[in-house]
Image: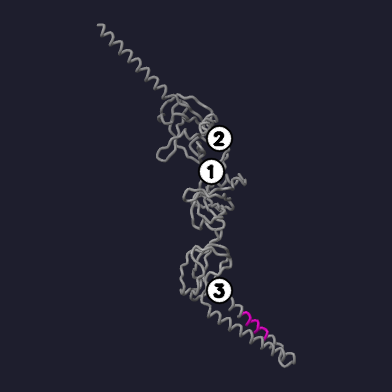
Amino acid sequence: MKRKLMLTGLCTILLYYSCTQKKEEKEEETNYTATSPLTLDTSFTKEYVSQIRSVRNIELRAQEKGFLQNIYVDEGQTVKAGQLLFKIMPKMYEAEVMKAEAEVKASEIELQNTQLLADKNVVAKNELAMAKAKLEQAKASRALAKLHLSFTEIRAPFDGTIDRLPKKLGSLIDEGELLTTLSDNSQMFAYFNVSEPEYLNFQQAKSSHNKSVSLVLANGEKLSGKGAVETIEGEFDSETGNIAFRAKFPNPNQLLRNGETGKVQMVIPLKNALIIPQKATYELQDKIYVFVIDKNGVAKSREIKIGGELPDIYVVSTGLNQGDKIVFDGVQKVKDDEKIKFSFIAPKDALSQLQLKAE
């Protein structure tokens, strides 16, 4: 009987502690902290995929037909303005110049003889005028022949880098045929597309600070020099709703080449931005969610759209309003449509906790 009483007492004690433990676990599970989104003026850095282009990139084409007699440069070579690059066999054009020179001399002699006769009133003044016109015509033909001869030499119009050489020595070149491409890589343009809201924020900010941009290269490294937004296209793309920006970057080491890709980092100013701590969110199938607490204390999952990202902070574009209460601590424990107990902390206090944690 005594043993039976001892077993009964032991079971009672175990049952008591079991109930107490479950109660404590339940209280611990429902001990959440909530906050609300904060509205303020801020800015964030956003990356844009960009196409990199030389400040000058032109095709060098033959202006005369003939055999390619000389190539004075190699692919990838740096050249100076005025440097001779190619020569097309000039024999025919040299002969045309010689012929034109002879015609000029003959016209000059004819004009001199006509002038002597005109002075003695042997010929009419009209014949003298015709002789003068013939000389001018011969000079024009000579100038044109010399121009054609000059076209047999292709020179660099500016300092730059030679691209591929598709034609080899001895090739028959047609008029207008591509000989190579010349790129001025002293500075580079980066073109990238910006959405309409970001464009408006950029224009309304109107400061030299937000015109400064950085360039992240394809290997993840950042270009040492900063660039600046110089121009914006005149109209939006009706299909994408974006507008193209152009930034210029220095390229003293010739690291950047025409046709590269990269990512432009630009500071986007935001007015009345709605921000929340990142720890108040969770991700599911590449979507971002928060738990919004209704007036009855029930936590309901809600998808939000992120308009920007700062250290430990999200800028919310859609999905939340300023007065909404969201779960701040314990997001991983709470369940959808669960009634919870929580303590509310002001948005500024919640953000200051993140800053203190980061320090």
Magenta residues (range) = 131-140
Query: Mark 1 or 2 closer to N-term?
Result: 2
Q: Is residue 173 magenta?
A: no
| Residue under the point 57% across and 63% down | 159
**Looking at the picture, does residue 47 appear above or below residue 124?**
above
Q: Quadrant of the N terminus?
A: top left
Mark identifier at residue 325: none
Task: Please give the residue where the numbered disc 1 appears in the rendered image.
Answer: 45
The residue carrying mark 2 is 39
In the displayed structure, 252 sits above or below 134; it is above
Amino acid carrying mark 3 in the image:
Phe
**Residue 149 shows up from this direction:** yes
Residue 111 image offset from top left, x and y in percent: 68, 87
Residue denoted by label 3: 151
The amino acid at mark 1 is Thr
Write the residue at 45% across / 26% down: 32
